[in-house]
Image (tube, rainbow, N blue to C red):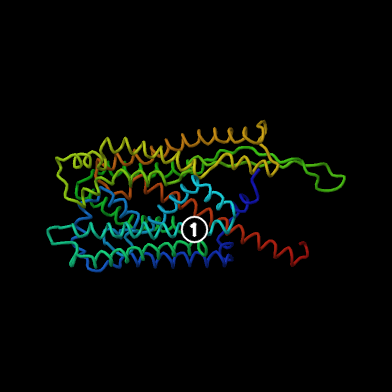
Amino acid sequence: MASPIELLAKNFSFSSFKKAEDLKKRLWFTLFILVIYRLGTYIPLPNINPAVVSEFTRSHAGGLFGILDMFSGGAIGRMTVFSLNIMPYISASIIVQLLTAMSPQLTALKKEGEVGRRKINQYTRYGTVLLAMLQGFGIAAGLERIVAHSGCAVLEPGMLFRITTMTSLTGGTLFIMWLGEQISSRGIGNGSSIIIYSGIVANLPAALFNTFAMGKQGAISIMALFLLLVLVITVIAFIVFMEKAVRKIPIQYPKRQTMVNMPANQQNTHLPLKLNNAGVIPPIFASSILLLPATISGFVAVDPDSIFGKISMLFSHGQPLYMFFYIVAIVFFAFFYTAIMHDPKETAENLKKAGSYIPGIRPGDSTADYIDTIMLRLTTIGSIYLCAICILPEVILSQVSLPFYLGGTSLLIVVNVSIDTMGQFQSHLIAQQYEGLFKRGRSKGLI
């Protein structure tokens, strides 16, 4: 039998959306913030030669620059104040989560509720500033080494340029972090995910136009374009199916007597466990780490015959060794991140405190072992799914030299964020409908 929320979702109409004033305000606010973000991706860094930077980025589009440029919505290629995007904040968040799992002090702080959460968020912001400053200084030093046919990337190199660039990039990252927090609190969806999503979607039309232009010029056959379209549609459908897949563990509560002389009733519910608990974190981290040697060799003049030059070639995008370690890294991060984010012992302890239990399983350690076994199986299937989504399209796209925007990682991010945002949109709409029911009930004296 469908739940009340599912029934309300099926009966959704445009008229009900028109009455949801708070939801419309949230949507308009989210769009307003995204417009500000997109404008910031066109504000260039001072003392930069845009032509040289654009030429260098195009020549290194197959490395880490290509992935970062995709996440930043083209800001890396234009070398703007938003070039670092929100990635330092995401990296700092994951580092703090890792430290929280390993540090007893941070674990105790996490259990303090709202006060502990604010303290951990403060540590995350400090980490964001530190990472942004380090990355900003590294980018400034790397830009001074870039020399192309049209000249140098930096007009006046020196310590003043490095400090200015580091400050500008750090300020841009902090401003994007603030924009993401505003979306999360006053808009629709997760702010960080929405910002990355908007950067990818903003460049999708250009990527599609370039792809069809290559087909028109004969660089890609019509049959290859048709197969690419079928592949993209199939991948999107498969992602939606797998991301909505949930393993429901039955949970029972003890019998409770609600009224005198009434039989006690037993409440049954379930514990939902997603098939892919790690989300898009494993592919992002795996690709960033593996493409790092090729990126360093692009910044620094490396002899192709040297050891580092040969390693960079082996780990370049589309190479068999890159694909192999890409799979290994995705599987590792999938298990590692899931183990950090979901603690079976904590879940079993919460169920025991609530007086609930899994039928046929003893409360306590037996419940924790049972949940851990199911999580292990789900993570195994989820990691295989992530590898298939990220590797198969990458192999095909590397053969026809198409952009990252049509790859599995970008499609995974776009579909994931779309599903989560639509879920929050539906929740706000259902809450609005419930408020309308309560108001009508009060006016008729039923409540």
Q: Residue 47 in the image: state x and y as whole percent.
A: 22, 68
Which residue occupies 50% across, 39% down? 275
SS type, badge 1: helix
Q: Quadrant of the N terminus?
A: top right
**Quadrant in the rendering for residue 437:** bottom right
Q: Quadrant of the C terminus?
A: bottom right
Which residue occupies 41% across, 57% down? 127
For label 1, the residue is 121
The answer to which of 441 and 251 lies nearer the viewer is 251
Residue 99 seen in render? yes
Q: Say which amino acid is labelled 1.
A: Asn
**Quadrant in the rendering for residue 163:** bottom left
Q: Residue 124 in the image: state x and y as whole percent.
A: 45, 57
The answer to which of 202 and 90 lies nearer the viewer is 90
Q: Residue 147 in the image: state x and y as whole percent.
A: 15, 58
The answer to which of 241 and 144 lies nearer the viewer is 144
Establish if 100 lies above or below 323. below
